[in-house]
Amino acid sequence: MSELFSKKNKEVFFTPIGLNNPVTVQVLGICSALAVTAQLKPAIVMGLSVTIIVAFANVIISLLRNTIPNRIRIIVQLVVVAALVTIVSQVLKAFAYDVSVQLSVYVGLIITNCILMGRLEAFAMQNKPWESFLDGIGNGLGYAKVLVIVAFFRELLGSGALFGIQIVPESFYEMGYSNNGLMLMPPMALIICACIIWFERSRNKELQEKN
Amino acid sequence: MKALRNFINNVKPQFEKGGKFEKFRSTFGAFETFLFVPDTTNQNGVHVRDAVDLKRTMSVVILALIPSLLFGMYNVGYQHFHMLGQTDVTFVETFLFGFLKVLPIVIVSYVVGLGIEFITAQIRGHEVNEGFLVSGMIIPLVMPADAPLWMVAVSTAFAVIFGKEVFGGTGMNIWNPALVARAFFFFAYPSKISGDQVWIADKIDSYSGATPLALANAGDTTTYCICDCVSGFIPGSIGETSVIAIAIGAFVLLLTGVASWKTMLSVFVGGALMGLLFNQFGSEANHMAQLPWYHHLAIGGFCFGAVFMATDPVTSARTELGKYIYGFLIGAMAIIIRVLNPGYPEGMMLSILLLNTFAPLIDYCIVQANISKRKNRVKIKS
């Protein structure tokens, strides 16, 4: 048991959430971060879906890693990811229909999410299943973290609500406050993402490159 | 004047290295050089021998903006009383009404913008740059008279932080900060800066306050004739209405050589040619396409943008040939957006921002073309 949570494994799990975040440091998976973050609920569902898919795709590829012929490895990886995406998409349709309608094509497009192929190629092809699983969960949560932060600000400032519940009181609107329409547009997601990167880089000196 | 100089000399040691307020050195320096010409001289090679520094250049632009500002104040009052049907209001009363409407917007824009400038200068240990002096004056002039002050503040803050400071401050920005502020306002709070409800101060609901641009979009060019648009007694953003006031500003800018006549001229040529093209080939059903080209130039923010924003030396193209291309495309794009996209009635803002983005590319192409031309010349000789 102690080996399962060794220091190295902890590192595999925690660095993608913090210092080597797939979105803010590696700048992967930006497209879906723009598309589904206008509200918190779809952002959380999206984050969880990606986490589950990365984790299990990592495990499956890691189990198969010694048998996959090198020349067709991308196709094999795609088949595994596509199968998992289809399962997740069907589960969402069955148990959370409203959210799956909101997410529309973006669940299907998880297959093109750069984080997935990146992790499979860079990690799962060289490591054992358990490490790969931790790496997948870590990367998925790192992705979900950014999505949730972006969605929090976009929903709060753009619609004055969180999880669809009105947060900004009616009296504010009567005093002349109004929702920021720009927050609901994709450009603002980029700017909030940039602010997160700005914040992280100013806190962690090792993220700043030397010119 | 002398007393002021003495006072500054007295407190100066406290702000210098080792002094009590060393932290606020840049703030102090900003005020000192704002009031007096700096008395420090360069010790080694000086290349430019001229009394004009950035602060004086900016002051000229402010001077050029004054006619538009004063006329804008008067027009805000005029539109208000015109709407109420009161014709016996004196000149002073009209001006005073507009003055009290516009002044808060100017103050908010300057306080917020300069506040952020000073704070970033302190954090970075830089001297305070004077770039915001002009932006802070242009921002109120492109706002509607009824703009809520907190929205002006938010837009200004956004423009200064994300339009300017993140790129490294004055001289490094890609987009004109005043236009970033307006674009932010336009997309964030569209109901307060477009439509026919916002252009007249304290408007009563039943009165239609549509701008000539919106009216022209609907095919109505008779409510305001072209002479109204030139003189400027029309609803619109505070400073953009009067072509005459803007022309005075343009005259000052060109006379002092602060703005480039090449950019300015080619914006108008581009707009006029594109207008003519639409007159010839545009669809009959599109009212904007059928609008005469000279009318296009007189309405909306076309003149204001061409004179004060397209010519911004930081964001415009810097090569001489590039200025023609840059200006021409601004004018042409503005008319294209106006005619073909009824969702954005004012094309000038978007077109200048678009060409701001492409200005470095235009410069790059021209410089590269020149380099390869000269290389070819060398090859032939050898």
Image (cartoon, rainbow, N blue to C red):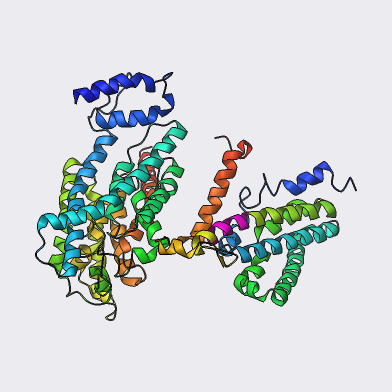
Which residue is most to the right? A1
Residue A177: x %, y % from top left: 42, 60
Question: Residue at position x 26%, y 66% from top?
Answer: B274
Q: Where, by quadrant of the figure, is residue B293 drawn?
A: bottom left
Q: Where, by quadrant of the figure, is residue B18 drawn?
A: top left
Residue B356: x %, y % from top left: 37, 52
**Is A137 rendered above or below residue B296?**
above
Q: Which residues are magenta?
A: A146-155
Q: Quadrant of the C terminus of chain A?
A: top right
**Residue B4 belongs to the span the image colors magenta:** no
**Is A100 rendered above or below residue A138?**
below
Q: Where, by quadrant of the figure, is residue A42 drawn?
A: bottom right
Question: Residue at position x 20%, y 42% from top?
Answer: B257
Which residue is most to the bottom? B285
Total numbered labels: 0
Question: Residue at position x 79%, y 45% from top?
Answer: A10
Of B233 and B245, which appears nearest the observer? B233
